[in-house]
Amino acid sequence: MEAAAPHNPAEQRPPAHCVELTVTSPEQMRELGRRLAKLLRAGDLVLLSGELGAGKTTLTRGLGEGMGVRGAVTSPTFVIARVHPSLDDGPPLVHVDAYRLSGGLDEMEDLDLDVSLPESVIVVEWGEGKVEELTEDRLHLVIHRAVGDTTDEVRHVTVTGLGERWAGTDLSVLSA
Ligand SMILES: Nc1ncnc2c1ncn2[C@@H]1O[C@H](COP(=O)(O)OP(=O)(O)OP(=O)(O)O)[C@@H](O)[C@H]1O
Ligand SMILES: [Mg+2]
C-alpha cells in the first residue's frame, strides 16, 4: 500500500525528476528503453553510465524499437556514432559509444553532435565528461549490477532529468 501524506496527495505531488528502478532481465531493460522512447523528442540528450555489460546497449536497443528507427542497435566495434533514421516522421536516433574516446568535446568534434542534436535524439554510452557541453538539459541514466545477485540479471537504474527540459516531466511514468 502506498503511504500518502495528508497534505500532499498524489495529484499534487511535484513531478519526479529522479527515479530509481529495478530491472530483472534483459527483456525488461529493453522495455524500459521502449518506455523511455515515449518521453523523448528531437533535441534530447541521454547519457548512459554503468560498467561494461551493465546493459546500456540493451536499453538503447529498446529505445530504438520504441522510436521506430531503422536498423538494429548494436555495440559498435569500430564505429563511434551510428545514425538510425526514423521509419516514419520521428527524429533519428544517434547512438554514440564514447568508450574509446578519452578526451573532451574536442575529440568528439568530428561527430558534429552539436549540429545533429536539434533534430535528433542522441544517446551516449560512456559520455560523462565528454558531451555535457552540448546542452545543460539532459537525461542521465546510471545502471548498476545488483550486489550479490547470483543470476547476474538484476540491475538498479537511476534516471535523473537535468535542466529546464526535464523540469516539467514526470519520470515516474518509467516505472509504470
Ligand atoms: N537486467 C539486465 N539488463 C540488461 N542486460 C542484462 C540484464 N541481465 C543480463 N543482461 C546481459 O548483460 C549484457 C549487457 O550488455 P550490453 O551490451 O547491453 O551492456 P553495455 O552496458 O552496453 O556494455 P558496454 O559498456 O560494453 O558497452 C547482455 O549480455 C545482457 O543479456
Ligand atoms: Mg554498450
Image (cartoon, rainbow, N blue to C red):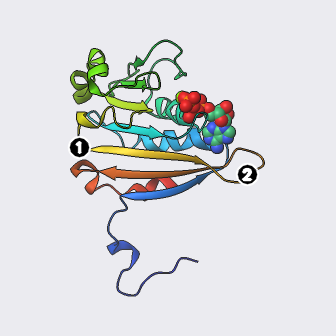
- Tell which residue pokes out farthest to the right in this image: 150
Let me know if residue 166 appears in the view: yes
Where in the figure is residue 161, as x and y percent of width and height?
A: 34, 51
Q: Label 2: state its secondary structure.
A: loop
Q: Label 1: state its secondary structure.
A: loop
Q: Hey, which quadrant is residue 129 in on the image?
A: top left
Q: Hey, which quadrant is residue 171 in on the image?
A: bottom left
Query: Which label belongs to residue 136?
Result: 1
Task: Judge left or right: residue 108 versus residue 36.
Answer: left
Residue type indicated by callout 1: Glu
Where in the figure is residue 6, as x and y percent of width and height?
A: 40, 87
Query: Which label belongs to residue 118?
Result: none
Let me know if residue 176 appears in the view: no
- Tell which residue pokes out farthest to the top in this image: 78
- The reply to whether the residue tagged 2 has its Cβ within 8 angstroms of ligand 1 is no
Figure quarter occupied by ligand 2:
top right
What residue sits right under mark 2 in the picture?
149
Q: Is residue 112 above or below residue 16?
A: above
